[in-house]
Structure formats: C-alpha cells, structure tokens
C-alpha cells in the first residue's frame, strides 16, 4: 500500500485523464524522454552483433512497414487475418454476452480492421463504447482512430501511441475491460518472453477482466511457409523495409536489394523464422553510436519469429501466467483460434513461469 501511494501516477495515466476530460489530443503518447531514434539505433547495434544476429520485431512497424503489413493481410496465402476475422464475425455477439459492456483495449491494433465486428456487437447493445487502440505506429493509429470515429459515431476512441508494456498502467483505470491481443501477435515472443509478457499483463489487469487472444495453430509446413513467402513478394518487402528504415532513420547506407527475405518453418520449435540474408558483404554505419558493423556475405539477420500453437500446450501455459480459459473459438479447418480468457481472481506475477 505504502509503495502504491509513494509511486507517482505514471505519466501515461495523466495523459489519458486529460484526453478523456476532453482537453488535449485524442492520441496519448508514450512518456516524453524516450528518444525513439536513439532507441532504434542502440537496439539495432546490439542486435546486429549478437549471436545469432537479430533485430527487434517491433521496429518493423514504421509507417511504411505498417502499410506493408496491411497488404500482407490481404495476400491469398496469408490465411491468418481472413480466418481470424471470420471467427470474430461469428462470435462477437457471444463474446459481448460473456464480457458485458467492457472497455475495449487493443494491443497492437494496427489499422484495426477486424475490431469493427466487436464494436458493432458492443453498439448493438448500448449506445456508447470506449475503444483504446494501442500501437507503436502513429500513422496506423491515426488512420484507425479517424476511420472508426467516422464509422461508429457511438465509439469514444482514444489512441495510445506506445509499446505494449507502456500501456499496462492504463489497464486498471479502464476496468471493467476486455483486452484484445489479436492476429497471433503473441507469436512474435519467444516462450520465455511470452510468459513474462503475460504475467506482467495479468499483474496489470484487474481480477475478472477479460483477454481475447488470437493464436495461429500448428499446421502443415507447406501452408505455413506459403503464408510467409507470398507470390507477390509483399512479405519480402516487409522484411527489407526494416533495413530500409535503418537507412532512413539511422543513416545506414545499406543496399536492400542485396538482402534476401528468408522464411522457414521449424517443426521442432513450431515457429516460422524470418530473416534477411546478405547476398554480399555490407557495412552498417550506425549513427548516433557511430559504429561500423560488417555483415559478411551469406550471414542472416533474424527479424521475426512467428510461433504456432496447440491448444493443449497454450491453455495450461496461460493458466500458469494468470489466465483462465473461458471459451475457445476456431474455424472449420482448425487453422486459427481465439481464446476468451479471464484474469484469475488471485494471481501474483512472482509465481509465473515456474517450472519453465
Ligand atoms: C503481426 C506478428 C502476427 O507473425 O504472422 C506476417 C507478422 N510477418 N508476415 C505474423 C508477419 C510476416 C505477423 N504478426
């Protein structure tokens, strides 16, 4: 209790209060002081020299990357978005029956196209709904806010421009809440990072609040690999855009044409592994750190993993992290699942991930 009163209210909470009081912007930003370019440069410098070489997936989503991701979601091979949308369309009103009129908070909302079905289900039962999309891409967020505001006049929309975890202090203020984490975005986390993320999320949520989690399910490798190697080459562009972003924001002089998109399914690890492979040696000029990092010909830089799940494994994992599974929705082919979870009544984050 003392600790609670001693800690000042996080700035993001103050910004939200101002936004809700009607003054100030309808977009709440991450705490000032964080320098995004410096953050990108430091993370990239660290990742490029680590073994294996890797870049953080969150940097894939600048304005160009978010737009490319939207194009990925409509490629014929990329079944995830289409399948999840059909599951949402079929179950939105059932979900609303179970959760009641909760505030909707969407982590990694992107353009928020899928959320329409939920908003409609909410507005079918009450004249108003509060919706807070959270995204690192300010362009995707502004687009989503204006589109939803125009389409659903009953929706009070406040965009939150920050990383997932930076939005966690808002969750207890917004209870009763339904947190949306769709698209199998959770698949970007390693198993350890997923447990710590979920434990922190459970710790930030109020008991009884809901989480709607989208997970892509394990399936035939050829279907998975096709989804991440579309014929039109949009996914390849998406991977290369991360390096192009380094050129734009960090002044690296990289020839992105000499970087090849590679996406393979590891059946052992049950994940798609995506990297940019250098078809010739290139040197990164990283500024502000002012470092030179040479990547030899043939070396690969991991940009993403996309884990695939089985319900038998993920449901007990979620339980260990503080979430009880209320209902599971899927499609006829069992390609994708939406789990409606509930924050357990008693849960302390310290006990999470035990035995892992
Ligand atoms: C947004 C992380 C769910 O893993 O399928 C799609 C990202 N990358 N194609 C995924 C992605 C390449 C996507 N997630």
Image (cartoon, helix red, strand yellow):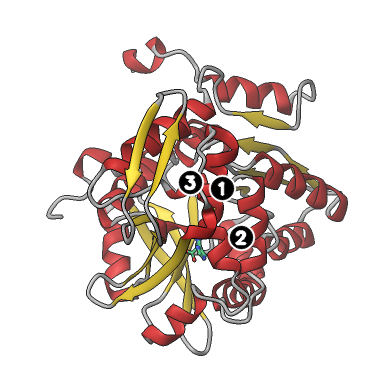
Residue 317 lies left or right of residue 149; in this view the side is left
Q: Residue at 33% across / 43% down in the picture?
A: 294
Separation of disc 1 and disc 3 at Cα? 15 Å
Q: Any atom of ligand 1 within 8 Å of the CB at mark 2?
A: yes
Separation of disc 1 and disc 2 at Cα? 15 Å
Separation of disc 2 and disc 3 at Cα? 12 Å
Q: Residue 73 placed where, x, y %?
A: 62, 69
Residue 29 lies left or right of residue 163; in this view the side is right
Residue 296 lies left or right of residue 275; in this view the side is left
Q: Residue at 44% across / 40% down in the picture?
A: 206
Q: Are marks 1 and 2 in contact (CB under 8 Å)?
A: no
Q: Secondary structure at mark 1?
A: helix
Crowding at dot 2, Cα within 10 Å, few <14 / some 14-19 / many 20+, comes out as some
Q: Residue 190 placed where, x, y %?
A: 30, 55
Task: Name the image quarter holding the N terminus.
Answer: top left
Q: Secondary structure at mark 3?
A: helix
Task: Name the image quarter holding the C terminus.
Answer: bottom left
Note whether 323 is above or below 293 in the view shown. Answer: below
Q: Any atom of ligand 1 within 8 Å of the CB at mark 3?
A: no
* Label 1 or label 3, whichever comes before in sequence order: 3
Note whether 64 is above or below 269 in the view shown. Answer: above
Q: Which of 109 and 19 lies nearest the eye of the viewer?
A: 109
Residue 348 visible in the shown view: no
The residue tagged 2 is 69
Note whether 124 is above or below 129 in the view shown. Answer: below
Q: Residue 248 placed where, x, y %?
A: 60, 38
Which of discs 1 and 3 lies nearer the camera? The answer is: 1
Q: Which of 294 and 40 lies nearest the eye of the viewer?
A: 294
The residue tagged 1 is 244
């Amino acid at each position: 209790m003392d600790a609670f009163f001693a800690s000042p209210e996080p700035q993001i909470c103050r910004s939200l209060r101002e936004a809700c009081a009607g003054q100030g912007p309808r977009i709440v930003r991450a705490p000032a002081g964080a320098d995004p370019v410096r953050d990108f440069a430091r993370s990239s410098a660290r990742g490029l020299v680590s073994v294996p070489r890797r870049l953080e997936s969150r940097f894939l989503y600048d304005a160009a990357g978010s737009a490319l991701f939207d194009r990925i979601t409509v490629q014929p091979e990329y079944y995830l978005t289409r399948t999840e949308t059909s599951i949402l369309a079929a179950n939105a009103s059932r979900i609303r029956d179970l959760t009641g009129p909760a505030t909707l908070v969407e982590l990694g909302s992107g353009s928020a196209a899928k959320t329409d079905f939920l908003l409609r289900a909410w507005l079918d039962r009450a004249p108003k709904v509060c919706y807070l999309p959270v995204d690192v891409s300010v362009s995707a967020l502004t687009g989503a806010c204006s589109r939803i505001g125009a389409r659903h006049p009953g929706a009070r929309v406040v965009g939150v421009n920050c990383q997932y975890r930076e939005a966690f202090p808002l969750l207890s203020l917004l209870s009763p809440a339904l947190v949306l984490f769709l698209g199998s975005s959770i698949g970007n986390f390693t198993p350890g990072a997923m447990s710590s993320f979920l434990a922190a999320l459970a710790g930030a949520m109020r008991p009884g609040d809901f989480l709607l989690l989208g997970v892509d399910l394990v399936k035939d490798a050829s279907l998975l690999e096709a989804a991440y190697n579309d014929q039109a080459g949009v996914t390849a562009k998406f991977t290369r855009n991360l390096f192009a972003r380094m050129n734009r924001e960090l002044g690296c002089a990289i020839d992105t044409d000499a970087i090849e998109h590679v996406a393979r399914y590891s059946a052992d690890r049950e994940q798609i592994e995506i990297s940019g492979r250098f078809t010739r040696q290139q040197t990164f000029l990283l500024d502000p750190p002012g470092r030179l990092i040479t990547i030899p010909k043939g070396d690969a830089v991991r940009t993403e993993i996309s884990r695939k799940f089985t319900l038998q494994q993920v449901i007990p994992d979620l339980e260990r992290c503080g979430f009880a599974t209320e209902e599971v929705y899927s499609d006829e082919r069992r390609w994708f699942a939406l789990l409606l979870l509930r924050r357990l009544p008693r849960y302390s984050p310290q006990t999470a991930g035990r035995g892992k």
